[in-house]
Image (cartoon, rainbow, N blue to C red):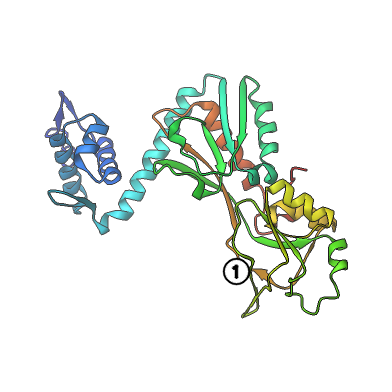
Amino acid sequence: MVDATGKNANQQNGKSMDHLALIEAFVAVARFESFTKAASHLNISPGALSRAISNLEAHTQVTLFHRSTRHVALAEDAREYLALCVETLERLRDGEQRLLSERNEPKGVLRVVAHPIAIEAGLTQVISEYQHDAPDVSVIVSTSSEPLKLEHGSCDVAVCPPGHILDGRAVYRPLLRSPVLLVASRTYLDRHRSHRSPLDFTKHVLVLCGTDTAATADLRFERDAGVARMAGAAVTMVVDAASVIRLALSGFGMALVPEVLVSRYLEEGRLQLVVPGYEVDREPTELGVGFIRNRTVPRRTRNFIDACVAHFSSIDNANPRARIELAA
């Protein structure tokens, strides 16, 4: 092991580079695609970094990178090994941080940015439970439906769809994946039963949720092996997550909305599927929790992330209607 990892060959400031350090060096080069940038990040010389990669290649007997004077590319055979190395380092850092912070109760300020859909999907319950368990933490929550960069430091945690986090180095943990439904109140449906076709929406009002601005002409429904297109609505509105539910419940129009937001009202019979037996041909709505992993993630942040994951993982995403508590 000593010869393979280069303990006697890789000397940097009088210290030998052990096998874990070689793995960190490998991950850094893969991340930056540059020996110079990776060496600067690790605070070692480019020569020491090059020797570290050579020793790891000798140990694994695999060429890890294809190198040229201008470019460094991860070898195809090394991709699976890289994923394993990244996971191993993440788990080690998690374990170290838990040991270091276990003695202290979480304190300070936690800044959370939440997408409006996250608020409606049950994040308020997560925050209430977290506040009960961490009374010394002040939680500041703001809502935003815009993309954001966590590295700017305006927040500690973001609960939002995956595409809304622009940081390449952000850690993102999925929370839920919910299909999109077309629903309306019984009152609204009774008013429009005289229409000849269940897909003829030419005299209907269609309310879209959040940033879903796709044209109504693109709204399609699947049934068995067939696909049907919706005839365009007379009125189309795009509103926030809370408003789309209120408008649907009031009988104003049909709502195109993630199932997780209306499951309670479907169970109660206050809303119904507009075209039963059809599935809306739309990508499911996804939510996750994102954060920037520095050397040390404060315990208050880590506990909130764990609370989000625990809460949403307890929901049966395949059939959430009877399991989730929604914000009113």
Q: Nearer the viewer, residue 163 or 268?
A: 163
Q: Quadrant of residue 275?
A: bottom right
| Quadrant placement of the C terminus | top right
Q: Secondary structure at mark 1?
A: helix
Which residue is rendered at x = 43% and y = 41% of the image?
Answer: 170
Find residue 184 and report its horizontal and vertical position in percent: 79, 61
Q: Quadrant of residue 16?
A: top left
Q: Is residue 60 left or right of 155 when viewed as pictured?
A: left
Q: Is residue 90 visible?
A: yes
Find residue 279 and report its horizontal and vertical position in percent: 67, 69
Find residue 285 and report its horizontal and vertical position in percent: 60, 55
Which residue is rendered at x = 12% and y = 36% of the image?
Answer: 47
Find residue 298 and report its horizontal and vertical position in percent: 49, 26
Q: Residue furthest front?
A: 234
Q: Which residue is mark 1?
A: 218
Q: Quadrant of residue 54?
A: top left
Q: Amino acid at mark 1?
A: Asp
Q: Is residue 33 left or right of 212 when viewed as pictured?
A: left
